[in-house]
Image (tube, rainbow, N blue to C red):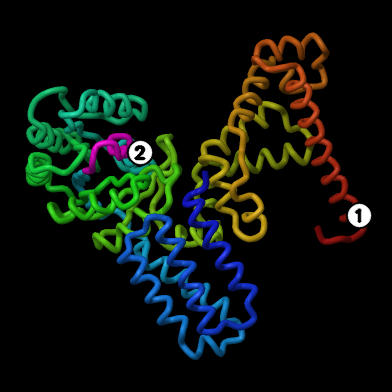
Amino acid sequence: MAIFEGLSSKFEKIIKNLRNSGRVTEKDIKQINREIKMALLEADVNYKVVKTFIGDISEKASGSEIMKSLTPGQQIIKIVHNEMIELLGGKTEGLSLKKSGLSVILMCGLQGTGKTTTCGKLANHLRKEGKSVMMAACDIHRPAAVQQLRTLGKQLDIPVYGSDAGDAVKIASDAVKEAKSKKIDVLIIDTAGRLHIDDDMMEELKDIEKVSEPVETLLVVDSMTGQDAVNAAEHFNENMEISGIILTKLDGDTRGGAALSVKFVTGKSIKFACIGEKMNDIEVFHPDRMASRILGMGDVLSLIEKASQNIDEENARAMEKKLMDASFTLDDFLSQMEQLEQMGPLEDLLGMMPGAAGKQMKGMKVDERQLARTRAIIQSMTPAERRNPRILNASRRKRIAAGSGNPIQSVNKLVKDFEGMKKLFKGMKNKKRSMKGLGMPF
């Protein structure tokens, strides 16, 4: 599911109508504001936020210089885009880590927001940036919370300090000492959540904050809970000084209310967004890019970043040569498919594409099970069969079908599609060669 799918589709319709408008009247602006207001309220955006947002757009869009412009529709689109960026935070806010010595990040939030998993995702993100990281398990109230963090630590090969019992404040204090002794760059402290905010919870958090002296206190907010998430953020911010917010479950059935309200209500920036279940599915929150995605304008920069993080440039060049030489094998195909999967849900990637292509592909349903079936078929082949599918006679195909748990028709289709792709690239190469022979500058 694309991020804010329902809200985005409504804004796309509004923007399409604006682009098609040769002229815009005061009446048109009032109608546009009504449509934007309804779209935001249906997305569970805080009413005060909606009122301010609409007021700002109305004030800026009603100016005579806009009305007399040759492209008033485009000017209003620009205003809506700029106001959306401001609503989401204005500018990208990174973490305020120390240049040397230990930086402590304190994670807090209600139970069920995905806080412990987010600790693992953030640790993985920071390690990719070259930081040495340790996690501390200070949620001693929720059954198996400590074990969950240890499992994540083992999976990521990141050390976890903690105890199944004892005092959370002492565990935090000891974890800081341990991290300093090992010259760790960043210590991430997971704390206890509750179903609702209570005095005991806040006192424990404040005590952990005193002994750990965090450079960042990040509130983990579940995007799917809408205004409940905003209310929780407001209460946390009133009780302790949070420095930023991490939104989780943006890949779920999220209407957008939390993301569009939380900065306005708390005054604190959204620093990260979690957009999937894998440990790589966390990204720095860029208000301008998110605004573009909500308004259906695509997000090319994030798409490029995902590609650069997950696709080896040297390998990509070698693969391009193989494609053009028609020496591309099923092993190569499987490798490329796995690299693409690492970039995140394919539906989300398609939704990041701008322009007409993005609009056509946005919302396109990608059958992830088909990708799994393709992988199973290729992995059921011998190395020789992957290098040269032409040796696949009837008995070999029958064996591969049985080994992969797929009908033989699926094996036949994969081989046919693969050979067709090779012919296509070979034809492209020949066409390019003939164009050069004619003196064409290709």
Query: Which residue is nearer to you in this view: 340 or 290?
Result: 290
Q: Is residue 289 above or below residue 51?
A: above
Q: Is residue 339 above or below residue 395?
A: below
Query: Which residue is nearer to you in this view: 36 or 121?
Result: 36
Q: Residues within 10 Å of mark 2 (few under 14, many from 20)?
A: many
Residue named by callout 2: 121
Q: Which quarter of the rendering shows the C terminus?
A: bottom right
Give the residue type that dot 1 points to: Gly
Q: Residue at x 55, y 84 (%)?
A: 25
Which element is circle 2 on?
helix
CB atoms of marks 2 and 1 within 8 Å:
no
Disc 2 to disc 1, C-alpha distance: 53 Å
Q: Residue at x 64, y 81 (%)?
A: 22
State which region is magenta: 107-118
Q: Is residue 389 magenta?
A: no
Residue named by callout 1: 437
Residue 300: x and y, percent?
55, 56
Q: Is residue 153 above or below residue 78?
A: above
Query: Which residue is nearer to you in this view: 216 or 117?
Result: 117
Dot 2 or dot 1, earlier in sequence:
2
Apparent side of residue 62 relative to residue 371 in the rendered image (left or right): left
Quarter residue 164 falls in: top left
